[in-house]
Amino acid sequence: MAIKKTSLACSVCGSRNYSKVISEGQRTERLELKKFCKYCKKHTIHRETK
């Protein structure tokens, strides 16, 4: 299994606030987490970007 570093972008403003190390396996969809965006100043959905 390979390990891949990816960034998480805010779904509201589009800023890339977080980075995450994930294992590259049999995933078909992108990772979605609810995190705090310091630019929107609220908790929003952050999606995995390439």
Image (cartoon, rainbow, N blue to C red):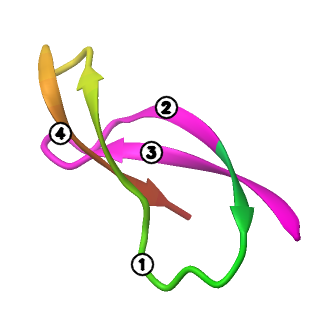
Q: Residue at x 87, y 67 (%)?
A: 2
Amino acid found under the numbered disc labelled 4: Cys
Q: Determine whether the residue tagged by mark 4 lies in a helix, strand or loop.
A: loop
Amino acid found under the numbered disc labelled 2: Tyr
Mark sitting on residue 13: 4
Closer mark to the observer between disc 1 and disc 2 = 1
Mark sitting on residue 29: 1
Q: Contact (CB < 8 A) between labels 3 and 4?
A: no
| Quarter of image, res 8 | top left
Q: CA distance from mark 2 to mark 3?
A: 5 Å
Mark 3 sits on what residue?
Answer: 8
User: Where residue 43 sits: x, y (%)?
Assistant: 15, 26
Q: Closest to the observer: 37 or 21?
A: 21
Residue 8 inside the magenta-drawn segment: yes
Mark closer to the chain start, 2 or 3: 3
Q: CA distance from mark 1 to mark 3?
A: 14 Å
Q: Residue at x 64, y 84 (%)?
A: 26
How many residues crowd mark 4 within 10 Å: few (<14), some (14–19), many (20+)? few
Residue 25 inside the magenta-drawn segment: no
Q: CA distance from mark 1 to mark 2?
A: 18 Å
Q: Contact (CB < 8 A) between labels 1 and 2?
A: no
Q: Contact (CB < 8 A) between labels 2 and 4?
A: no
Q: Residue at x 47, y 59 (%)?
A: 49
Q: CA distance from mark 3 to mark 4?
A: 12 Å
Mark closer to the chain start, 2 or 4: 4
User: Where residue 14 sits: x, y (%)?
Assistant: 26, 45
Q: CA distance from mark 2 to mark 4?
A: 14 Å
Q: Contact (CB < 8 A) between labels 2 and 3?
A: yes
